[in-house]
Amino acid sequence: MRSFMLTGIRIMEMFEVPDPIIARSTDVLVRMKVVGVCGSDIHYFLNGRIGSQVVEYPFAVGHECAGEVVETGPGVTRVKVGDRVAIEPAMPCYVCDQCLAGRHHTCRELKFLGCPGQAPGCLSEYLVMPETSCFPVPDGMSYDQATLSEPIAIGLYSVRQSMPVEGRTAGILGFGPIGMSVLLAAQAKKCGNIYVTDRIDERLMMADASGAAWNGNPDREEITGIILGHEDSGLDIVYECCGKQEAMDQAVELVKPGGKIVIVGIPEFDRWSFCVDNIRRKEITLLNIRRQNHALEETLELLACREFDADPMVTHRFPFERADDAFRLVAAYGDGVMKAMIDFTGV
């Protein structure tokens, strides 16, 4: 089969590699249909690492995906040949202390698609996954929607962790795909006024169309002053979704005493900095988000019953043969991109 792999900083190449095979009775062979380009993929593309996770070249990235089941091991009961499936990229061990505590996303032996040292990614024509990572989707759901269930599940998990949100005020700093996923999930959970910031005007237009109470560009506007002019007591919750220190500084100013800052974004640096006086005097809760945990099924249900419209998130589409162009576009924040999809349906 063909596989697109990173071979250096900002370099991707197509390889012919052996077809994956079913090795365990619970394995499922999936023909890829759509792969989404995630911000974490771009970290590997631009920097070759995220923290301690360092790429050894060549390496296939990608973890947002959906496809069609073409073969199953003899022990598989969840899916069958011909099923359309969304893929949960996390593969926990189910037996460590974290798994037994229900924290499968912090499994001691976790393997994650497209994560160096754990598992090759899905930017290939075929993929083998355990059946526990394969979720059937209804006929009316598109492959795009099935693929978007992965980032939206992170948004839903972030909102779940910050509950209750009903009637509360919130800020979303950074309105890329994860920021939009947080907005959709917060709206589904009846959050009150939601204030959105981003440096890309096309994304702010999307936030406005998606029902944000206010949106602003920090390169042109004094964000904290304007938002606090609307909410003079401060915001109940601020979701940091861009991994930028200046956004974290704004979050500390915006959140009210006793409020929460939910850290969803992945920074390119190794250490956050905080004004100790502010976070101590306000007694701010800092909540870190690690991907998602037990949120994918509810996300698929919300998508299936059209609780929100995620389709506008997909702004660009590339054939598999041009996957490198998709990565370059997203890395450059070009053409107002929100989510770029790599399409295998013509392969």
Image: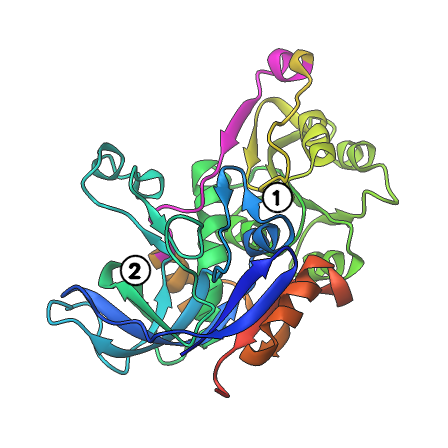
Residue 296 appears left or right of 35: left
Q: Residue at x 30, y 68 (%)?
A: 128
Q: Are marks 1 and 2 in contact (CB under 8 Å)?
A: no
Q: Amino acid at mark 2?
A: Ser
Instruction: State the image quarter where residue 200 is shown.
Output: bottom right
Residue at the disc numbered 2: 133
Q: Residue 41: x and y, percent?
A: 55, 56
Range of residues picked out in magenta: 278-296
Residue 281 colored magenta?
A: yes
Q: Residue at x 73, y 31 (%)?
A: 250
Tell me the number on the disc at residue 119: none
Camera sees residue 192: yes
Q: Residue 150: x and y, percent?
A: 45, 58
Q: Nearer the viewer, residue 142 or 332?
A: 332
Camera sees residue 313: no
Identify whether 183 is placed above or below 68.
Answer: above
- Work out how far the residue at label 1 is from the one at label 2, CA to CA, in angstroms: 26 Å
Residue at the disc numbered 1: 241
Instruction: Tell me how the rendering is colored.
Output: rainbow
Q: Which of the two labelled residues, at mark 1 and mark 2, occupies the earlier sequence position?
A: 2
Identify whether 95 is placed above or below 120.
Answer: above
Q: Nearer the viewer, residue 116 or 245?
A: 116
